[in-house]
Amino acid sequence: MDQTTPETPGTTPSTSAPRRVVVVGGGMVAQRFVEALRDRDTAGAHHVTVLAEEPRAPYDRVALTSFFSGRDINDLALGDATLWDDPLVHLVRGDAATSIDRTAQVVTTASGRTYAYDELVLATGSDAAVPPIEGADLPGVFVYRTIDDVVALRGWVEEQGRRWTRPVRGAVIGGGLLGLEAAGALHALGAQATVIQFTSHLMSAQVDLGGGQALKRLINDLGVAVRCDTATSRMRPSRRTGAVGRLDFADGGRLDVDVVVLATGVRPRDELGRAMELEIGPRGGVVVDDACRTGVPGIWAIGEVACIGGACLGLVAPGYAMAEIVVDRLLGGAATFPGADTATKLKLAGVDVASWGDAFATTPGAMEVVWADPVGGVYKKLVLADDGTTLLGGVLVGDASAYASLRPMVGRVLPGDPAAFLLPEGGGPRADLELPDDAGVCSCNNVSAGTVRGAVRDHGCTDLAGVKACTKAGTSCGSCLPLVKKLMTTELEQAGIEVSNALCEHFDLSRVQLYDAVRAAGLTTFSEVVARFATDAAGRGCDLCKPAIASMLSAVAPAHVLEGERATLQDTNDHVMANMQKDGTYSVVPRIPGGEVTPDGLLAIGQVAKDFGLYTKITGGQRIDMFGARIDQLPAIWQRLVDAGFESGHAYGKSLRTVKSCVGSTWCRFGVQDAVGLAVDLELRYRGLRSPHKIKLGVSGCARECAEARGKDVGVIATDQGWNVYVGGNGGFTPRHAVLLAEDLSTEDLVRTIDRFLMYYVRTADRLQRTAAWVADYEGGVDAIRQVVLEDSLGIGADLDAAMAQHLENYEDEWAATLADPAKLAHFRSFVNAPDQHDDTLAYVAERGQARPATPAERSGPVLVAGTTLEVRA
Amino acid sequence: MTTVTPAPATEPTTSLPAADTSPTVWVAVCALTDLAVERGAAALVDGEQVALFRLFDDTVRAVQQHEPYTQAMVMSRGIVGTRRGVPVIVSPLYKQVFDLRTGECLDTTKGDPVALVTWPVQVRDGVVHLARPATASGAA
């Protein structure tokens, strides 16, 4: 299947052999082209070769900045990796096309390999433009375009950080979209950052002056300085290092720097087109018509290198549209470029900016409706046609939540008063939009509202994951997901498909609704909850609602799990505070906070396990699990453990499990913070906190991340300045890396942030919903949760803090309390009428020096080697 | 605290002793107050493990302690509740749902339904009595 050998050029393809398509360039648009071609060319009539200059498959360049916080190159992967294993697809990495013979129809690469083509697609993209400023070639001056650029920049900043005792001083020249992302990246690396903008305000290509001013305030709030109306006249080397050391400005000002990022724009990489004598646009770019055809038959150009409608477009959405057009044309279609959707959304933590359509009101007669809150750093503008109702475009700064629903309305009449769309949440009646079927919802993947509705109506999708898989909507940047979800829900409701969040047959309410209701009504027992809120007051609950209500009550009205009626609500694990195993015995896990245990503690656990004949295993959560305890043995086992200073590890609960940690700065020569100390503090803080599902935390003492904290519900990673906190990670069936919630927090701020995150999760997640699914499903995603947790956007911060304080105040070791109360101990009797006898059906076999349950065959045969009682000196 | 609760009135006939056998022998097991409301307890009756359940209205039900899908002796440790008004026990291991009156499996979660053996129960003078089950015990 390797097609790299030279083939006879110019041959007319037979109908049986696939046509040879060569794509020059391996960026996002090339990826989309291949995806679309393999998706639509069901007959396999085309073989496509992609020549990528970078030594890797196409990746999500738009999300490059996230690489700083994520630090995992795989987070930038695009689409389905198996695309490149397709026999009709050949990806050549790390080998740039250097020349094209358009007569012979052959492309030659840097390594000298040649590729014959029937159809040639230029998708070479752009280069970062280096402005003609003296000193732009000094060490310490970077562009911001590829993974390699970002890696080099990061390495430089980290090296400077080690060199100086003061913070690293950084500057970004260019205050556009990319410049702001670069500034955010410098800031994330712990450097001071100043944005130097030549024009009057930031993002001046997308946002008007009012929006730019609001944006500047938001950027300043992040700790990034901004200088507008400033031209850089030269960059001067440091006398000590020879690297860039100072910026001189045209107005006579100057700025000392250790690193400079150039973000002054991009330049189409049209050199191959020029060499082939294709027509080139006035400001560069290979000129194409609205079908993306160059002047030469069989040669196409797509993405940023294409000059379409007289301009090169530096955004991914129009590039995707061009890729789809060429695929359509290759397959005999007649698609044309519909005009550029230049809608933009800035992806920078804490800064919400969106701009779309005629943002500058250049249409004759256009009217602007503006709502500005300079104090809050919010600026919103809608541009309307002269009829006052047709939306032409808009700018949203500080709160872009309306972007997803407004952008598809361009060219359409807005229902109701346009001002209603600009008011803050709760500031007035929220306008509701009924999108027409042909309105675009996901611009990255060109998915219309009708397609989303069709996924529900015709393809039977009933959840967001299904709709995403079916339509690809929301699978790139994700900004449209709230809208997709809303469309899906509406469609499901109209189809009569009940989107029921009801807990079970006993309660019509969802967990969240019931939680709020119980809290508001001040109920403290299950019977009160049934009497007040159940569908049938005679019902007595079930295995679904009872544990959920036990969990709510433990937060609303704290009491021991075995206190009165509470004892009837618990799964057997919570009821006997141990984990039931396949033979009906239990495993026992004492808490070992942060995985830190003394030799005496280990000896005590070992002696208990030995005396009771328990199988022992180290858990993934850095503690010790002891298996094979009968229900009637649990109190004696725990008496020994409590006497040795241990307490319940809640391994059985929908509650905090462990806080895993690396060894941290105490011992590790790389550690920058005391990971173990923090992990112990966090584990002791959140122990016993009942939640919708289990919660796991992790703390790593440096960026090496030995504690695998990003696989946890809450992961903390030490930085030189403090702690980064990540949320929503998961292992198990659907592994997910936690995403960054906040950076460089002090320990105090970190703890408050985690307090609020966990308590908000406890209050608003669905039954058995881990934080990963909760964060993913939360309207507005992690950005919206960040606003609640860090900026207190809902005004419930103090309430969440108080709830956590109440948890801390009420914590007691469940096992110590049980041992002190004969009524609670009664739950552990083997037989109500024969408490001195025990289950004699248990049977064990020795394996690798320990006991394990006998298999059915072993139970009936003669091979039984260990009885049920390996007793004990209880 | 408890008056005599005659079991048969609402007892489904399927779990009653067959009419043509010898007179029913009732075995005293424990005091009603030994049982927690809506939380099962295991008992040994003639050497056999039985799961007892005291319901919200103080009715007592008895089924086999043997969980038929896993062979573990755990039925008493499930959650007691109702399904459409029917008192049920949910297996603590794989969540199969059984009718506490008849032993019928209402929700298998996987595999074929297997019914539990039930014991007739009477509470007399605050003491829980069991009779021999209607069918041969399936318990190991």
Image (cartoon, coloured by chain):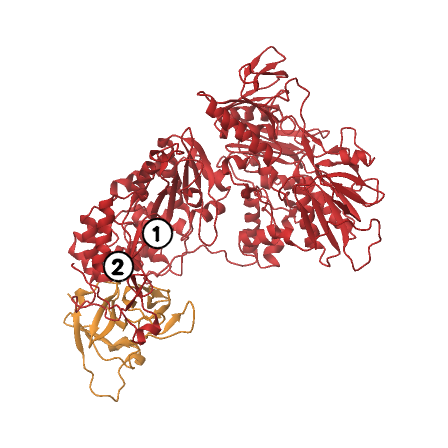
Chain colours: A red, B orange
Q: Are marks 2 and 1 on the same chain?
A: yes
Q: Residue furthest bottom?
A: B20
User: Looking at the image, which residue is at 29% across and 41% down?
Assistant: A684
User: In 3D space, how far apart are the residues under numbered discs 2 and 1 (Cα atoms)?
Assistant: 15 Å
Question: Left or right: where does residue B137 sit relative to residue A83?
Answer: left
Pick whichever, A463 or A643, lies toward us: A643
Pick whichever, A764 or A222, lies toward us: A222
Q: Which numbered circle lies on residue A619? A: 1
Give the vertical position of A193 relative to A278 (above or below): above
The kind of residue on which mark 2 rests is Leu
Instruction: Identify the subunit bearing mark 1.
Output: A
Residue neighbourhood size for the residue with mark 2, other residues' Cα within 10 Å, grouped as few (<14), some (14–19), many (≥20)? many
**Residue A579 x %, y %:** 31, 57
Please name the residue that numbered disc 2 is placed on.
A614
Give the vertical position of A615 relative to A867 (above or below): above
The kind of residue on which mark 1 rests is Thr
Pick whichever, A557 or A839, lies toward us: A839
